Image: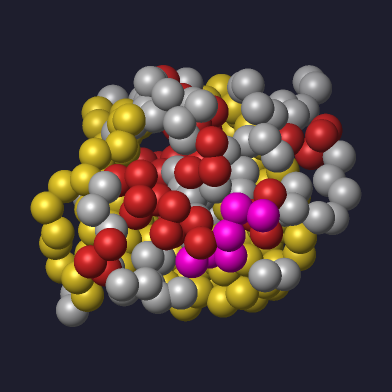
Amino acid sequence: MVLAVRAVHDTLPSMKRIVPLIALSACVLMASNVAFAQTADEVIEKHLTALGGREALGKITSRTMSGTIALSTPAGEVTGTIQVFGKTPNKSRSVIKVDLSQFGIGELVVDQRFDGTAGYVLDSMNGNRDVTGSQLDNMRNAGFPTAFLKYKESGVKVELLPKEKVSDRDTFVLQVTPKSGSPSKQYFDAETYMLLKTLTTVNVPQLGRDVEQTGEFADYRAVDGVKLAHSVKSTNPVQSFTITVTAVEHNKEIDDATFVKPEK
């Protein structure tokens, strides 16, 4: 067992750096006449309409999702499962389990929790830790089911940038700048107004530097009248992973204790 673990560290020197970034994520979602979208606020309103509308979104008080995750490493792809919990106004939790038995390590478990104020990660490989810095600010900014429902009340600044293409799609690009936390560029399909891509720079204390992370969203499906992406890909200079959602349940009772840092 010791030799197996040693071999993993020799062949995967960046494994310990890769694991903390899994939790970043998480997180992660009517065609209209594009000529009418001339301001950032109009793009956001058309996006909310495309998702199902403010009324439908306002009826979603909790969400439980489960799926699979495929994580790229220097030694090849590893797979596992993911569960994501969300609750108004901004509580969240993700539990990722990845099988590393091929490297002689066993199962990796990363359980990230945010209770609306404080964040905490239980990490079977790198040890448990508080979430701090821009990562914590970003959790606080992530309103459920979407931060765009109350972005003006939160003091978020949005600016419409020149159009760009994402693959073969024309997109409206918004620069989204919260009062604190990481600014991001968000790319919305110019026909459907669905979010296709995000670019966000976050500070990762475990790495001691900033990391630019790209999120890609696809396979939108309606669940209870609200559309959400069932395929999410996250890429940064250290790692990439793809989440495929297999089940979604809305408005299931979730105990607030689910999101709280466990007592010692």
- The relative height of residue 161 versus residue 102 in the rendered view (above or below) is above
Q: Is residue 42 left or right of residue 100?
A: left
- Tell me what residue is drawn at x 30 percent, y 51 percent: 186
Res 35 → quadrant: bottom left
- Tell me what residue is drawn at x 35 percent, y 51 percent: 42
Coordinates of residue 69 in the picture (x, y in percent): 52, 66
Q: Which colour scheme is used?
A: secondary structure
Q: Which of 77 and 1 is in front in this view?
A: 77
Coordinates of residue 182 in the picture (x, y in percent): 33, 31
- Magenta-drawn stretch contains 131: no
Magenta stretch, main secondary structure class: helix
Coordinates of residue 102 in the picture (x, y in percent): 50, 68
Q: In this view, does 226 lie to the left or right of 153?
A: right
- Quick one: quadrant of the C terminus? top right
Coordinates of residue 92 in the picture (x, y in percent): 64, 41
Query: Which span of residues is magenta-colored?
Result: 50-55
Res 246 → quadrant: bottom right
- The relative height of residue 222 versus residue 256 in the rendered view (above or below) is below
- Tell me what residue is drawn at x 25 percent, y 28 percent: 209
Q: In this view, does 89 lie to the left or right of 158?
A: right
Res 157 → quadrant: top left
- Quick one: quadrant of the N terminus? bottom right
Residue 65 in view (yes/no): yes
- The relative height of residue 180 versus residue 59 in the rendered view (above or below) is above
- The relative height of residue 127 versus residue 61 in the rendered view (above or below) is above
Residue 109 in view (yes/no): no
